[in-house]
Image (cartoon, rainbow, N blue to C red):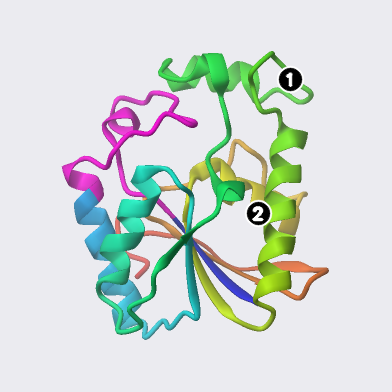
Amino acid sequence: MNLVLVRHGQTEANYEKLIQGWTDNPLNELGIKQSHEIGIFLKEGQYSFDYAYSSPLVRAVKTGEVALSYLNDKLPIIIDYHFMERNFGPFEAKIAHPVLKEVLKEGFTYPGFEDDQMLLGRIETGLLKLYEKHPGKNIVLFCHSHVIKSFLILAEPKNYTYRTFIDNCSLHQFAYDGTDLKLLKFNLTTKKKHF
């Protein structure tokens, strides 16, 4: 299975450097522009997908709708709750830097907060279910920073952590054979002119 992950475009909470988690914030103007840019990249790169998936959160769904409008596949978006952002619970809507400095410490737990092991377990379950449904297929998934970081950690735990930076509307490509998850492309962004 070939899997392309795209982080959603910018929201006002991203711009203001706030924790979002499960808070359902829409894209801002720049986020819409970024979604068009990733769509153009997918078209120019002649990407073709058998299935399109998204987190249920509106920022991911809208990114997917805009990006997929550039492809001829006319794929419907399948919502998958496994790939929602980390649930930050009581830390949502707070300034990101001091919160992340605390909650990303190894072994951190707090009531209502989805800790690292819970999140990794959810993402791994989602990945296995995708593979069971679509072995050998090309999948695009519109999702979130900590979802992508989870994939990176599952693929290369020595090289990536939840502190790894993931740009809005960046693209990450993986291959999965039901056992081994391999990272093929990391953090491609229009901002860095990698497209």
- Is 65 rendered above or below residue 184? above
Callout 2–callout 1 Cβ contact below 8 Å: no
Q: Residue at x 68, y 13 (%)?
A: 111
Q: Residue at x 35, y 75 (%)?
A: 42
The amino acid on which the numbered mark 2 sits, given as a three-letter code, is Phe
Residue 19 belongs to magenta span: yes
Q: Which residues are magenta?
A: 7-31
Kindly state the secondary structure of the residue where label 1 is placed.
loop
Please identify the quadrant where the N terminus is shown.
bottom right
Return the x and y of residue 47 as percentages of the image width and height.
41, 81
Name the residue that disc number 1 marks. 108
Side (left or right) of 145 relative to 133: left
Q: Is residue 25 or residue 103 the one in the foreground? A: 25
Q: Earlier in the sequence, mark 2 or mark 1?
A: 1
Side (left or right) of 59 relative to 146: left
Residue 165 belongs to magenta span: no
Return the x and y of residue 160 as percentages of the image width and height.
67, 47
Return the x and y of residue 193 as percentages of the image width and height.
31, 64
Return the x and y of residue 158 as percentages of the image width and height.
77, 49
Please identify the quadrant where the C terminus is shown.
bottom left
Q: Quadrant of residue 3?
A: bottom right
Q: Is residue 95 or residue 63 the one in the foreground? A: 63
- Is 125 rendered above or below residue 37? above
Q: Quadrant of residue 19?
A: top left
Side (left or right) of 109 relative to 57: right
